[in-house]
Image (tube, helix red, strand yellow):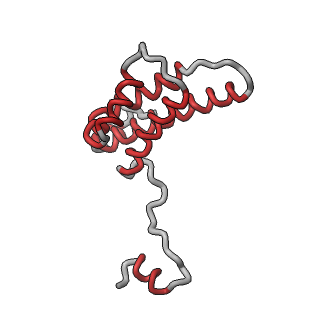
């Protein structure tokens, strides 16, 4: 959780703080989904309210960025699932919306783990090119 009473947090650029908040919201959804999946796989009837509310929270945090980057169809799908609380969303629909958001956060580099180029280390020319030697 982002601690706003910490001097280290206050001295960071706003972009870094927002990135930490988004990562936290992303993690919160994964925690809710894990709990839902565990209960469902154990045969216990479980409601999707926690997953959906955390997806909504992530969507609202990333709203402006998603509106700029998504196709109108994708944005409308997210908007419908996350904002229309009268709509009875099912688990696959919620997961599809999460994947859309996750993909955008990955494209931004916020969640990206594989930052190194993939190359065949046995191919000397490919290795040199990947490391910046032309």
Q: Position of residue 102 (x, y in %)?
A: 44, 42
Q: Position of residue 21 (x, y in %)?
A: 39, 35
Horizontal side, residue 54 vs residue 62: left or right: right
Single out the residue that lies furthest toward the right. Answer: 42
Q: Position of residue 46 (x, y in %)?
A: 63, 19
Q: Residue at x 53, y 24 (%)?
A: 90
Horizontal side, residue 20 vs residue 119: left or right: left
Single out the residue that lies furthest toward the front. Answer: 73
Where 45 sits versus 26, above or below? above
Q: Residue at x 33, y 35 (%)?
A: 73
Q: Position of residue 67 (x, y in %)?
A: 27, 36
Q: Quadrant of residue 78?
A: top left
Give the camera-side residue of 18 and 79.
Answer: 79
Single out the residue that lies furthest toward the top. Answer: 86
Q: Residue at x 68, y 25 (%)?
A: 39
Q: Quadrant of the C terminus?
A: bottom left
């Amino acid at each position: 959780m982002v601690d706003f009473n910490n001097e280290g947090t206050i001295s960071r650029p706003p972009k870094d703080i927002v990135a930490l908040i988004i990562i936290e919201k992303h993690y919160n959804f994964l925690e809710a989904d894990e709990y839902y999946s565990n209960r469902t796989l154990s045969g216990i009837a479980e409601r999707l309210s926690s997953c959906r509310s955390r997806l909504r929270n992530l969507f609202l945090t990333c709203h402006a960025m998603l509106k700029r980057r998504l196709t109108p169809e994708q944005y409308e799908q997210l908007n419908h699932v996350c904002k229309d609380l009268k709509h009875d969303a099912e688990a696959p629909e919620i997961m599809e919306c999460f994947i859309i958001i996750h993909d955008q956060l990955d494209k931004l580099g916020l969640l990206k783990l594989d930052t190194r180029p993939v190359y065949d280390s046995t191919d000397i020319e490919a290795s040199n090119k990947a490391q910046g030697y032309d």
